[in-house]
């Protein structure tokens, strides 16, 4: 993450995505909360700055892998333990050479393999635990 001149580091994209998801769940997609104003708040006084930056969720295909995990988690029947699972998923994907969401989308377009998907076959080849069929389905729903 970048810092502004006084050393303030704005929130990560996965944190921003989690806030966006929370607002969508409570006020509906397309509500007037977007874009999010990233502000600095003085913890002593509670005073907030004018927005340092405006951020709008660019959609799953343009997120980081970490932020995509937040979007996947929203659609899971049994949610992951967050934020711990984010690093587990990213480490697993990195082990098979997937470092970006477009690379994940390309892997999801490949033919069937172990456990019903080629991605899981790649994971098995590197001794990584495969994704559940429902998680693969959510990835496909979000990215293809």
Image (cartoon, grey):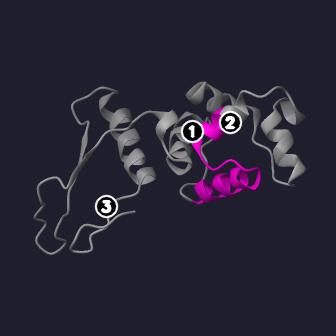
> Which image quarter: residue 10?
bottom left
Mark 2 secondary-structure assignment: helix
Pointers 2 and 1 in contact (CB under 8 A)?
Answer: yes
Q: Which residue is mark 2?
A: 135
Q: Is residue 90 magenta?
A: yes
For image coordinates 48% across by 42% down, the residue present is 63
Residue 10, label in figure: 3
Mark 2 or 3: the one toward you? 3
Q: Which residue is mark 1?
A: 72
Task: Residue 20: give x, y in percent of width and height.
Answer: 36, 41
The residues tagged by marks 2 and 3 sit, at their Cα atoms, a distance apart of 30 Å
> Local crowd at mark 1 within 10 Å, few (<14), some, or many (≥20)?
some
Disc number for residue 48 = none
The CA span between labels 1 and 3 is 23 Å
Residue located at (44% from left, 33% from top): 59
Label 2 Cα neighbours within 10 Å, binned few <14 / some 14-19 / many ≥20: some
Q: Nearer the viewer, residue 62 or 17?
A: 62
- Quarter holding the C terminus? top right
Give whichever of 44, 3 is nearer the camera.
3
Q: Quadrant of residue 6?
A: bottom left
- Give the CA distance from mark 2 to mark 1: 7 Å
Give the mark nearer the N terminus: 2 vs 3: 3
Q: Is residue 26 magenta?
A: no
> 5 above or below 62?
below
């Amino acid at each position: 993450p970048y810092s502004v001149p006084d050393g303030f580091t704005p929130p990560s994209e996965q944190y921003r995505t989690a806030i966006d998801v929370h607002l969508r769940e409570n006020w509906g997609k397309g509500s007037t909360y977007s874009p999010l104003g990233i502000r600095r708040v003085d913890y002593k006084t509670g005073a907030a700055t004018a927005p340092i930056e405006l951020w709008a969720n660019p959609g799953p295909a343009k997120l980081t892998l970490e932020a995509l995990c937040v979007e996947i988690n929203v659609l899971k029947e049994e949610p992951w333990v967050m934020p711990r699972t984010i690093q587990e998923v990213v480490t697993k994907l990195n082990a098979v050479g997937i470092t970006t969401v477009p690379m994940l989308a390309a892997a999801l377009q490949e033919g069937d393999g172990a456990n019903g998907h080629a991605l899981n076959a790649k994971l098995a080849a590197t001794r990584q635990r495969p994704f559940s069929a429902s998680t693969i389905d959510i990835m496909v729903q979000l990215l293809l």
